[in-house]
Amino acid sequence: MAKSKKSPKPKAQTPKGFRDYFGVEVSERKEMLDKIAQVYHHYGFDALETSALETVEALGKFLPDVDRPNAGVFAWQEVSENEGKPGDWVALRYDMTAPLARVAAQFRNDLPSPYRRFAMGPVWRNEKVGPGRFRQFYQCDADTVGAPSVAADAEICMMLSDCLETVGIPRGDYIIRVNNRKVLDGVLEAVGLPDTDEHAHTRGVVLRTIDKHDKFGDAGVMALLTEGRKDESGDFTDGAGLQPQQVELILGFVNGKQANNAQTIENLAALVGDIKVGLEGVEELRQISELAAHQNYGEDRIVIDPSVVRGLGYYTGPVYEAELTFEIKDEKGRPRQFGSVAGGGRYDDLVKRFTGQSVPATGMSIGVDRLLAALRAKGRLNGEEQGPVVITVMDKARMGDYMEMVSELRKSGIRAEVYLGNPKNFGNQLKYADKRNSPVAVIQGTDEIEKGIVQIKDLILGKKIAQEASLEEWKDRPNQFEVPRDQLVSKVTEIIESYSK
């Protein structure tokens, strides 16, 4: 009789494009989210948590139009309860804005208008994986739905500035760059690409191309919008088929930033001429600049910059992007600017898909993982978290006494745990405490019990002595203390606080 084959063991590996987060990474993200949420709440925004899943119908036309709509998103078709009838297509949310549009329409009779909400959580995109580019990442959004005033856009920009400074990006290390899609619409109309179905595809190509102007430069944009471009690998991308003189006007817009906001606005007004939609956009930029300046958000924080276009097709007015301006080193040691960590804009037609009525809306999204990476790159997060005090176990029969010690420490606000592994090898217990980055280990064996004392080992000092034994300041400092049992909490507290000064 043939032996039955054993099932192969599954591979213990993270799916491609995803990653696991441990200890301090989770703590640092939570701390950042809490700080950002405090700013949002202070501005009067309410929290909202939506489902991770949305129907593909609700996500809308911004998904690729294919038979199985999973290009760009993770989607599947549910099993229908009705025989002969296909189930609904659902997808993991790819951002927080599309779910908000659905909520604003579904609960429009219950929500205040304007409705101001913030949302935080993971989003998923079924995209090509690259260095630092993952298929699951955190977003942290704030939006105002039902406010047509450009003051709502100005407020979002000012709030974004406050968020960056609150999490540890000082003034001078970032800039909020603001533009307006209406101005670009005016420029495209001037070059013969009005906002009609006939020109929708070409306009989309133009948007996506100039959104990458910082990567390709003027020559790359000219090539992509005319005859096509060959990259360094030899791959060729077809061009949009525009004439060089059309692209020159578009590049004039993209490169239209001047010495200050007032001059930039005047330059954009000259570019759009008498085209109505373009002039509306210019006037809105003027108002945003003036409102920000009136609240002392000067051009060192918020600046008008025509090179910002944002790639998504649903923006209808002002768009903005937060860029970190300091330099970091890439994987080859070359200096480069960190780049964008947040963006957003006005999208007055998104809710209309559900209601048939235009509902003004504007908002922003902060890329939390990129912002954390930026802080780490600048050394503003050390990637370390102090572990718990570890109560070592010298006698398993006395586990109740050890639990009493840990309870006293916890009641005093000290993070602590009893070692719950195999206590046979005491050296392994100290290795465990080191691996946990514990500040203190507590030891009480038979001798200590008889004397009514505990041994307290300063593990932080122990590490410093091991690493910097030549430094005079550590030579005469003891790293283990014998104290009466009733002084356990006070001595542990003293040691921990001595390193937080």
Image (cartoon, helix red, strand yellow):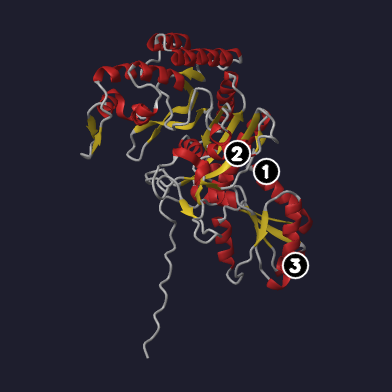
Q: Secondary structure at mark 3?
A: helix
**Disc number lying in front (2 or 1):** 2
Q: Secondary structure at mark 2?
A: strand
Q: Quadrant of the N terminus?
A: bottom left
Give the residue type that dot 1 points to.
Answer: Glu
Q: Position of residue 484 (x, y in %)?
A: 76, 57
Determine which of the numbered discs, if any, sits on residue 400 in the image. 3
Which corner quadrant of the image does residue 49 belong to? Answer: top right
Q: Nearer the viewer, residue 442 or 138?
A: 138
Give the residue type that dot 3 points to.
Answer: Gly
Q: Find disc 1 in the rendering and name its residue.
A: 497
Q: Position of residue 237 (x, y in %)?
A: 25, 36
Q: Residue at x 57, y 43 (%)?
A: 121
Q: Residue at x 35, y 40 (%)?
A: 331
Instruction: Note whether 274 is above or below 10 in the view shown.
Output: above
Q: Nearer the viewer, residue 48 or 187?
A: 187
